[in-house]
Image: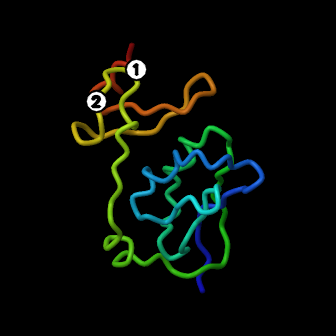
Amino acid sequence: MVKRMIVKIDEDKCTGCGQCVSPCAEGAIQIIDGKAKVVSEDLCDGMGFCIGVCPEGAITIEERQTVEFNVEKAEAQSKSTDISISCFSCGAGENERYLLPMRHNMESLWVCTRCLPQLIHG
């Protein structure tokens, strides 16, 4: 066991919308019995890309004792593509451009790397 950062999902707040599943590139999050769950702690890298897309604020990161992150196991997971994820500005999907989660005006959005500079600099 090691002490490290890992995702924590509040089941009371989670509505099971599934928006956190695709951003988890390691495949650590799945919807089980209508709620998002970390299915294997060794798959969670603790980066928290899922946090920015959760509309309910059900996901946090905490430091605690757990198993080590398993890079090989994470890389072996099948990758999921969510066609509903696209840049809110230009509409580009993840197969066209790199997308980043962001929060703006209390809303979780995706923005592509081409549109991001315009948002930052106006």
Mark whose residue sits in front, 2 or 1: 2
Q: How many marks?
A: 2
Check disc 1 and report the residue beneath it: 119
Residue 61 place in picture, x, y as percent: 63, 58
Question: Residue lying furthest front in this view?
Answer: 33
Res 37 → quadrant: bottom right
What amino acid does circle 2 point to? Ala
**Front residue of 44 and 81:** 81
What amino acid does circle 1 point to? Leu
Q: Secondary structure at mark 2?
A: loop
The answer to whether 87 is drawn above or below residue 9 in the figure is above
Q: Residue at x 72, y 56 (%)?
A: 10
Question: Residue lying furthest top in this view?
Answer: 122
Residue 54 place in picture, x, y as percent: 59, 43
In the rendered image, the quadrant that contains the C terminus is top left
The answer to whether 3 is drawn above or below residue 91 in the figure is below
Check disc 2 and report the residue beneath it: 92
Q: Considering only order in the chain, which callout, 1 or 2, is on the residue closer to the N terminus?
A: 2
Q: Residue at x 68, y 43 (%)?
A: 57
Q: Residue at x 55, y 32 (%)?
A: 103
Measured in 3D between alpha carbons, the distance from the residue under mark 2 to the one under mark 1, in whole angstroms, is: 15 Å
Mark 2 nearby-residue class (10 Å; few <14, some 14–19, many ≥20):
some
